[in-house]
Image (cartoon, rainbow, N blue to C red):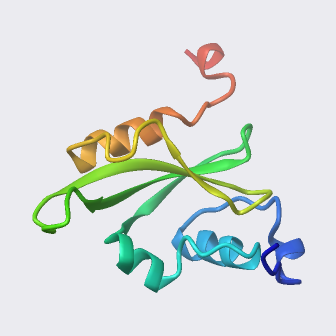
Amino acid sequence: MSYVSPIFDALKGKPVYDERDAETLNTASGRHWFKPETKRFFGSRVSSTFYPCFDKRVSYFVTSEYTGFNKQGRAYSVRQINWDTGEVDTVGNFLAYRSYTGAHRKAKSLVIQPYASEAA
């Protein structure tokens, strides 16, 4: 069992709006996804745009990683962080998007906006 910081209870369940929020929640829950050494090992970069989804209690975001060990190309993945657990998961396939724009389009589309059909 990993160490869970006392600060986790104060953060748990609150919306995640940016990488700083995500890193704080993830670390407080005893996870290491946003630690610099973890990101460096995987060659991960985190986009500055987060898409909170209030009805699912997650925020979607985009990362890019190297496509091979030669570090020449990058591709993009859509991720989600759970507001209640701090856990990060990949949505769909890892490195599924060849463009930054395509990955962000997908992340944004995952945010369900209640009553959108009624407003039209």
Query: Is the residue 48 above or below the residue 76 in the image?
Result: below
Left or right of 81, for residue 56? right
Vertical placement of residue 63 versus 1, above or below: above
Side of 43 relative to 81 (left or right)? left
Residue at 36% in and 80% down: 40
Q: Quadrant of the C terminus?
A: top right
Asked which quadrant contains residue 1, the reply is: bottom right
Q: Place residue 29 in its image quadrant.
A: bottom right
Residue at screen point 82% across, 65% down: 12
Q: Above or below — where is 111 with respect to 66?
A: above
Where residue 85 sits in the image (x, y, percent)? 77, 59
Residue 55 in the image: above or below residue 119: below
- The image shows residue 61 at horizontal and vertical percentages of 48, 54
In depth, the one of 87 and 67 nearer the eye is 67
29 and 21: which is toward the camera: 29
* Residue name at image x 52 percent, y 81 percent: 35
Could you tell me residue 99's position as x and y percent? 21, 46
Q: Position of residue 70 (x, y in %)?
A: 12, 67
- The number of discs equals 0
Query: Which residue occupies 39% across, 46% down?
Result: 94
Q: Is residue 116 left or right of residue 85?
A: left
